[in-house]
Image (cartoon, rainbow, N blue to C red):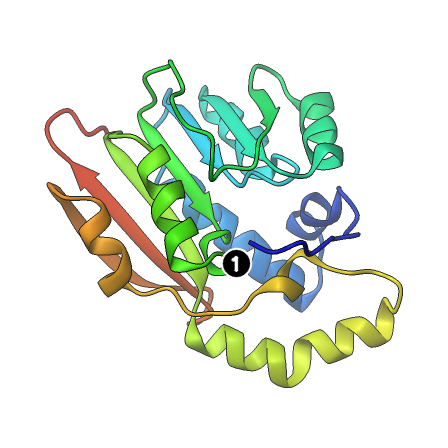
Amino acid sequence: MTDFKSTQPVDYYHRAFFGKGIIDRFHWERVSNILREIPWGSIVLDLGCGSGLACHLAELKECVCYGYDIREECIAYAKNRARCSVFTCDNLIEGGGWSFNHDVVLINDFLEHLTHEQLVAVCKNAGRPQKIIITVPSRLELWFEKLLYHRLRKWKNPDVVFDDEDRHRLVTAKELRPLFPGYTLKTGLWCRGMTRYFIFRGGDGVRD
């Protein structure tokens, strides 16, 4: 994580999820796949929650969510739309030690912004939940964004600095697997190959 400063509108992903465009469909599919992996009634820890879209939608599955993000304006927006979820501004790397017993940890499109050392710190702060859901951009998505998408978006929004402009590396199963000993790993691609997901399940009592 760098001193990068995003000026992305706080409601960007909420508008995209309910939008009708091609890129909007990508965001809808990614978040919908995440929601399918969250069991009804779970206690969810969302690290890098942004403006709280996944948490707000998980509330419809009777989940209680605890979201953490470094952008104060995003946390303020998330709190304003929350039904029962709790949102906190935190840098995520030095955090941890949360007292509640969460069932699911979600780390959605966040780890690709970090160095390996920072990534390790965030994953350690995730604790030992029953299920860990991680999404990162695939090699195809990183290539597509660099070649075309970011240029087109900047042409349409010249004054906006988007969150994903700080992306800088690929995250792999080889890097993540050792961080969650005792868990089984399922990995694959969503969104026509654009999103790589990692789903870790650990121990007894996993609710699917």
Residue depicted at 67% across the width and 56% down the height: 163
List the residue tagged with mark 1: 113
Q: Is residue 79 left or right of residue 136?
A: right
Q: How many marks?
A: 1
- Label 1: few (<14), some (14–19) or many (≥20) C-alpha neighbours in 10 Å: many
The correct choice, above or below, for 191 with respect to 78 in the image is below
Q: Looking at the rendering, which quadrant does residue 55 occupy?
A: top right
> What amino acid is at disc 1?
His
Residue depicted at 51% across the width and 48% down the height: 31
SS class, disc 1? helix
The correct choice, above or below, for 42 with respect to 111 in the image is above
Residue depicted at 76% across the width and 35% down the height: 73
Residue 94 placement (x, y as % from top left): 47, 34
Residue 70 placement (x, y as % from top left): 62, 38
Residue depicted at 72% across the width and 33% down the height: 72
The correct choice, above or below, for 132 with respect to 58 in the image is below
Quarter of the picture containing the N terminus is: bottom right
Front one among 54 and 100: 100
Q: Looking at the rendering, which quadrant does residue 136 occupy?
A: bottom left
Residue 17 placement (x, y as % from top left): 64, 49
Residue 108 placement (x, y as % from top left): 47, 48
Quarter of the picture containing the C terminus is: top left
Front one among 183 and 89: 89
